[in-house]
Image (cartoon, helix red, strand yellow):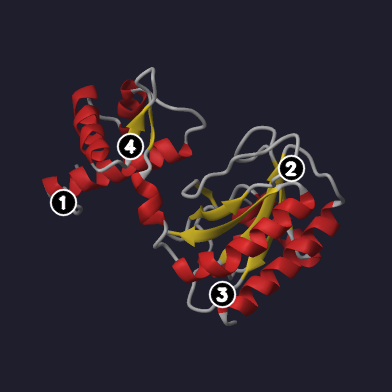
Amino acid sequence: MDAAKPAAPAGSQTLSRGIRVLEVLADADRNLTIDEVAAALGVHRSVAYRLVRTLEEHTLVTRDAAGRLALGTGLAALAAGVARDLQQVALPELTEVANELGMTCLIAVLADNEEAVTLLSAAPRQTMTVVSYRPGHRHPITRGGPGKAILLAMPESSWPVEVPDALRAEVAESRARGYALSHDEVVPSLRSVAVPLTLPGQPPAAIAVIHVSMPRPEAEIAARLTAAARAVSRSYGA
């Protein structure tokens, strides 16, 4: 153990592990077993079980018919209060873009200076293929369209320490054209187009669409996202 970094008190460690359970379930593309959650946390199955039982009591975690774990309905009440003003002004715009383009549209924000976290998303009403991208989904800002669009809005001095030269060159190219692209970087088979979203008093953000294919030219999609970003910024008071 690092002598310069004392261990966290037991209470805060338990809280941290409980939050990690929620993050693991949010990032998973399917319901998980207790053993899978324990492995993701690096703890014994009995520890994971106690954490899950507490979260179940607060309806933050639920079980399906097979006993596998998923996020519970209690999170909806918590999520409703997160960036409430931004959600109120942005969701109608995201829904309009999603229905117009036939693609899931989302807003991601910078967290911990290294990750892009999906704040809210909207899926199109009528389309053959709907891509679900739940709020709370996290990935490094060095991967994926939303992450790289966030990088576009940040000075390089604020970037994560280890950004490869190839990514720096890609971001420079993206900045010149005004939007970021990704394919197979966060979720296999998914493509993304994203643009920066600047809001007063908020961390760097991005507005993006994701799909298994691009139904329109990327530049046309980016232009629509840029218009949406401007509309959200105006409504938010920028």
- Residue receiving disc 3: 199
Q: Position of residue 63 (x, y in %)?
A: 35, 27
Residue 174: give its label.
none
Task: Count neighbours of disc 3 (C-alpha within 10 A) and say few if under 14, some if 14 to 19, many if 20 or more.
Answer: some
Residue 126: give its label.
2
Of callouts 3 and 2, which one flags the residue occurring earlier in the amino acid sequence? 2
Q: Which residue is outermost to the front?
A: 125
Question: Mark 3 is on which residue type?
Answer: Leu
Quarter holding residue 174: bottom right
- Residue receiving disc 4: 61
Of callouts 2 and 4, which one flags the residue occurring earlier in the amino acid sequence? 4
Q: Residue at x 60, y 82 (%)?
A: 238
> CA–CA distance between discs 3 and 4?
32 Å
Question: Mark 1 is on which residue type?
Answer: Pro
> CA–CA distance between discs 3 and 1?
37 Å
- Residue receiving disc 1: 6
Task: Count neighbours of disc 1 (C-alpha within 10 A) and say few if under 14, some if 14 to 19, many if 20 or more.
Answer: few
